[in-house]
Amino acid sequence: MMTVRELYEKVVNGVIISDIELQRAIVYDAEKQALVIDSIYHGIPLPAFYLWQREDGKLEVLDGKQRIEAIKKFKQGNLLYEGKTWKAYAYDSDLQQVVDNAELTTIICSGTEEKKREIFNRINTLGVALSKFEVLNGLYHGNYIKGLNDYFAHDANVRKVLPNATVDRGENKYHLLEYLYYVHKGGVFPKRVELHDYVQRHKDESFNEEIKKIKPYISFIRDVFGDGSKIGSVLKFRLSVKYLKDRTIWQQHKDDICKECNAYIKSNDYKLSPSKEEDIEAIILGIAGHVRVDPKRLFTKEDKAQLLSTLTSTDDGLYECNQCHQHFAAEELTVDHIRPWSLGGRTVLSNAQLLCRACNSRKGNK
Ligand SMILES: [Zn+2]
């Protein structure tokens, strides 16, 4: 992002070079130039400005020359907007202020000359629609998005969890926003419209509260998945929300988790699986739960008899449910694993408890 003032100063100081051979030939007429000013003044997002970082530190404009031309002409008094010059707006209007402080989406690319031409060609052949994030950024620019941009640019954990591609056009920031929404709603990813509403509602608020809320999840992801995991960011987000409480256990097994998951992701099973995310989740749970699963899953009648013989019954011969503490006949009680079998709890009496049917089914397959 760059304000109009910054952009203009860089153009005037020669840091941004807008007349290079690559530029497209179409020239805006005065009406179209005024429309550029009108869009800026009314907060209607302009397409992104593509700038090329040269080795000498200067920026060449790959896309946006005509828009820059319009800004330059207006600020230098050579273009009228609504019949008035830039100077004429100085006293009786907020226009100068609003225009100068308006933020423009700038994308700075770098690399080989070949890549530069390639980017330019694509911009010109495909035309560049705004990315999902650029749209949000343009529509709801305010404290909230600004805070997000800063957080994304500077937080070490975020930098690790959501690596920024050279030309990512805010895709990962968009993910982060979806994720925030997900955390807020306790596990629901937003539709596009819902995310728009959400960002719009928070537009002028500080982003700091959001940072506090997602920090533990972001560091969970970093601690567990580190740099080496091939698991996609959306799944990592989901898992972090669901299993934050198991953070320490997962962290202890992070090497195995990365190794096993990466191997699975490379495998044919993964390609064919209709339930890729669930598979990965199960793999991780297996590792984190130390599942050297006891081959014996169910307690036998003999186990139950033995357990009952160690417990005291009431005068009526009833036994206490270990969870709800009500009393039941022996037939109404089941023997349950204290540490769940699926998490490596063994089928031995030291890991056994009596539960009534209601408590047992409430416990489910946990
Ligand atoms: Zn019970």
Image (cartoon, rainbow, N blue to C red):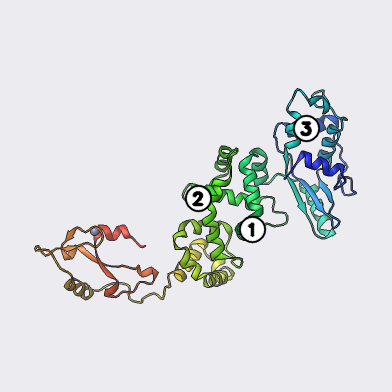
Q: Position of residue 74 (x, y in %)?
A: 84, 32
Q: Is residue 264 visible?
A: yes
Q: Amino acid at mark 2?
A: Val
Whether residue 117 is situated above or below residue 145 in the rendered picture: below
Dot 1 alpha-carbon crowd within 10 angstroms: few under 14, some 14 to 19, many 20 or more: some
Q: Quadrant of residue 313?
A: bottom left
Whether residue 106 is situated above or below residue 271 in the rendered picture: above
The secondary element bearing badge 3 is classed as: helix
Residue tagged 1:
159
The secondary element bearing badge 1 is classed as: helix
Q: Nearer the viewer, mark 1 or mark 3?
A: 1
Q: CA distance from mark 2 to mark 1?
A: 19 Å
In the rendered image, which quarter contains the N terminus? top right
Drawn side of residue 288 relative to residue 34, left or right: left
Residue tagged 3:
37
Q: Does label 2 or label 1 sit earlier along the sequence?
A: 1
Dot 2 alpha-carbon crowd within 10 angstroms: few under 14, some 14 to 19, many 20 or more: many
Q: Amino acid at mark 3?
A: Ile
Q: Amino acid at mark 1?
A: Arg
Q: CA distance from mark 1 to mark 3?
A: 35 Å
